[in-house]
Amino acid sequence: MPSSETDDFSSEPEIDERRVDVAPPTTPAALSKLLALWRSLAAGGEIPHREQLDTFVLRPWLGHVMIYEAVNGGRDFRNRLEGSEVVMLTGQDWTGRCASEVDAKFGSRMLAYMQDAVRTGEPCIHTMWMFQNDAIRVTRLMMPIKSRPDGPVDQILAVLYPDRA
């Protein structure tokens, strides 16, 4: 196990969902480039907001983007956008569904990771076997954002990429 990994596993033995400090070398560079963009926008200590991360800015990542919005005061997150590449990769479209539903179906910790990203104001990276197909290793990046410049952190901008062999 590389030193950048933490012991952050789901209680389900078939889910190998690991939080890592940096994306593994098998992750497409696009994921790290998006994280660098988020960090540059957050350089002044403010969490980036959707006006800074509109569809024109996110164009290189759009197919891989998922946007989750806090519901019930952040007790859950509803998927507002599921990128076409994510749908093709997973074979499922979770638009309109909640992170708690993903966790219930796959034994994952998606909701807890989202809540942690909002609480800390820090992005998080996870590597795992894809829930729907355990033959594909993926890396997921979750970044806290605000829907309005003057609002609270109430969304998660996430991307999912299959790892290169």
Image: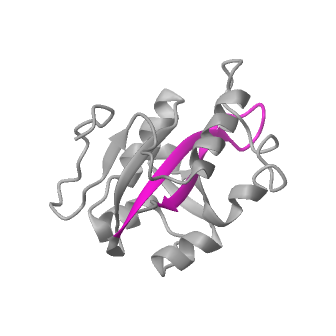
Residue at 42% x, 60% y: name it: 138
Find the magenta span and give its range: 136-162
Residue at 24% x, 61% y: name it: 15
Percent from the top left, x then y, of residue 21? 41, 33
Residue 164 visible in image:
yes
Give the left or right position of residue 156, taking residue 162 as reference: right
Please identify the residue farthest to the front as the structure is shown: 165
Q: Between residues 53 and 120, which one lies in front from this camera angle?
A: 53
Percent from the top left, x then y, of residue 154? 61, 42
Please identify the residue farthest to the left as the structure is shown: 13
Label the magenta part by its dominant secondary structure.
Answer: strand
Percent from the top left, x then y, of residue 69? 59, 53
Percent from the top left, x then y, of residue 38? 66, 36
Quadrant in the rendering for residue 104: bottom left
Residue 141 within the magenta-colored segment of the rendering: yes
Quadrant in the rendering for residue 62: bottom right
Residue 99 within the magenta-colored segment of the rendering: no
Residue 148's place in the image compared with 127, above or below, is: above
Please identify the residue farthest to the top as the structure is shown: 44
Residue 67's place in the image compared with 53, above or below, is: below
Residue at 45% x, 46% y: name it: 25
